[in-house]
Image: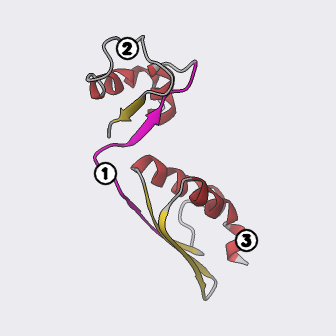
Amino acid sequence: MVKAKYQNVLDLGQELNIQNGDVSEENGILKVRGTAKTQYEKNLLWDRIKAIGGDNPSDIEADIRVADESVYHRHTVKSGETLGKIAKQYYGDAMKYKRIFSANSDILKNPDLIHPKQELIIPNL
């Protein structure tokens, strides 16, 4: 029953390719464990859990670890994106594009010139 309630979370976990995933139900509590690639992916899972169960759900216990804590995320540029749009997606503030530019100065020489398929580091705040 509770597993069905949180099926969207489990689906997202599969979509994100969460490693070492384990899901069990015990006394009406869904226990979810696994390792997300980055903090951003962990946050996506928690946001989905909260959207379903509220800020402090009592029917789910999630132990989500992060494999790479050195970055917030790694983003592959898509056609039409700008550093401002990417910053808005991850930080909620387009002006933080400078942080992304600085973190990728080895491959970016101009913040207005990014190319599809480039992998950018999205630094921790």
Q: Answer with mark 3 or mark 2, whichever residue precedes in sequence.
A: 3
Mark 1, secondary structure of its residue: loop
Q: Name the residue nearer the viewer: 52 or 116.
A: 116
Q: Which residue is mark 1?
A: 69
Residue underneath mark 3: 4
Q: Secondary structure at mark 3?
A: helix
Judge whether 68 appears above or below 122 on screen.
below
Separation (CA) of disc 1 from disc 2:
25 Å
Pointer 2 local density, CA inside 10 Å: few below 14, some 14–19, many at least 20: some
Q: What range of the chain is rendered magenta?
A: 62-79
What amino acid is labelled 1 in the image?
A: Glu
Q: Looking at the picture, how far across and down is residue 52, in whole percent? A: 66, 60
Q: Which mark is residue 111?
A: 2
Pointers 3 and 2 in contact (C-beta within 8 Å): no
- Of the residues under marks 1 and 3, which one precedes in the sequence? 3
Residue 112 rendering spot, x and y as whole percentages: 42, 10
Q: Amino acid at mark 2?
A: Pro
Tell me which amino acid carries mark 3: Ala
User: For the point 37% across and 35% down, which residue is it?
Assistant: 122
The mark found on residue 102 in the picture is none
Q: Quadrant of the C terminus?
A: top left
Q: Is residue 74 magenta?
A: yes
Q: Nearer the viewer, residue 61 or 39?
A: 39
Q: Which residue is painted at 64% across and 84% down in the image?
A: 28
* Mark 3 nearby-residue class (10 Å; few <14, some 14–19, many ≥20): few
